Image: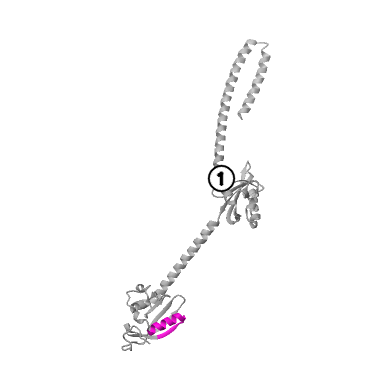
Amino acid sequence: MHEYEVAIREAERGTSRLRELRLSARERPATILASALEELGNAIEMLRASGEELRFQEELLVDSTRALEAERRRYQELFDFAADPMLQMDLNGMITDTNRAARDVLGAPRCAAGTPFAQLFSEADRRRVRSTATRARHLQNAQELEVRVVDRRGEERITLLRVAASLSGQPPRAMGLRCSIRDLTTERNTDVIRRDLQQERAARERAELRRQRLVALLDTIHDPLFALDVNWRFIHANRAAARLFGAASADELLDRDIWSEMPDAIGSHFYKMLTSAVSRGERTVFSDYYQPTRTRYNVHVFTGRDRTVVLLQPETGGVVTDEADTGRAFSIS
């Protein structure tokens, strides 16, 4: 029972008692006076206690009001300074309040109070937005939808729309709608970049694996084989080619100029045939004698867009002991 109800009942009881005392006062004045004074004292004490209780209740009410006001300010600050655009609407989808992010991203005039919420989105998505808001209102749980929102510059952004009903009372009833709009454009771009980088890294790893397998395969070839770039620099050589050019390893030849490694070959039959095959971009096979190994080779030239592969296969018969031009690496034709 509330305090004010107790006070009303006590007042009614006091009124009834006062009426009785007035009727009895004609017969026993002195007795009635003493009794009246005692009851008056009790009533005063009861009123004092009631006053203290009311004062205490008032203090609790003030504290509760202050706590509610502080909570309201805290909620308003969280609402205003949220990173994502947030809006509040009535049940008809009309905007009633927005935070700073919404006004910055969407433009203050476009999301002013009384503006239709659905107008913020692309025309293709507006019907879906209205349906989502209706479901949130009737189902009373949050609904999410990926849509395109038009920002204040008129550009469309991919966003995640989350709409929920503002509930109040028992049983809970929807009093309005609230929503947040999270921009997915940056996340999507980041995902695309990350995916591209992963694909590029995977492609490099596959290319490196193929290269390693090719190197291992070419190293099993006993005949000298090497590849040159467009600047006549070695980009690959197997072990036999490294021995042919007097290098300690195949890696030692990389990035070196072939004509620096065999300057005496410049102007030779080998030089003319190789440069001619590269300039024509045609596969060529010719025979030539190499003085350092005293061997005649069948030279196979395979040309490509950015590289040339050369394979030296010794002719049947092996080492040649006598050749017309023994003073040069390759013979002059």
Q: In the image shown, does 156 or 70 lie closer to the viewer?
A: 156
Q: In the image shown, does 175 or 185 lie closer to the viewer?
A: 185
What residue sits 65% from the left and 19% below the top? Answer: 17
Q: Quadrant of the N terminus?
A: top right
What residue sits 45% from the left and 67% below the top? Answer: 204
Q: Is residue 87 left or right of residue 248?
A: right
The secondary structure that most of the magenta stretch takes on is: helix
Residue 20 at x, y = what percent?
67, 17
Q: In the image shown, does 17 or 267 lie closer to the viewer?
A: 267
Question: By what rule are the colours in the image chosen?
Answer: one colour
Asked if residue 282 lies in the magenta stretch, the reply is yes
The residue range painted magenta reads 268-286
Pointer 1 residue: 80
Please tell me in which quadrant of the rendered image residue 316 appears: bottom left
114 relative to 205, above or below: above
Q: Quadrant of the C terminus?
A: bottom left
Asked if residue 209 lies in the magenta stretch, the reply is no
Residue 183 at x, y = what percent?
56, 54
Please tell me in which quadrant of the rendered image residue 318 appears: bottom left
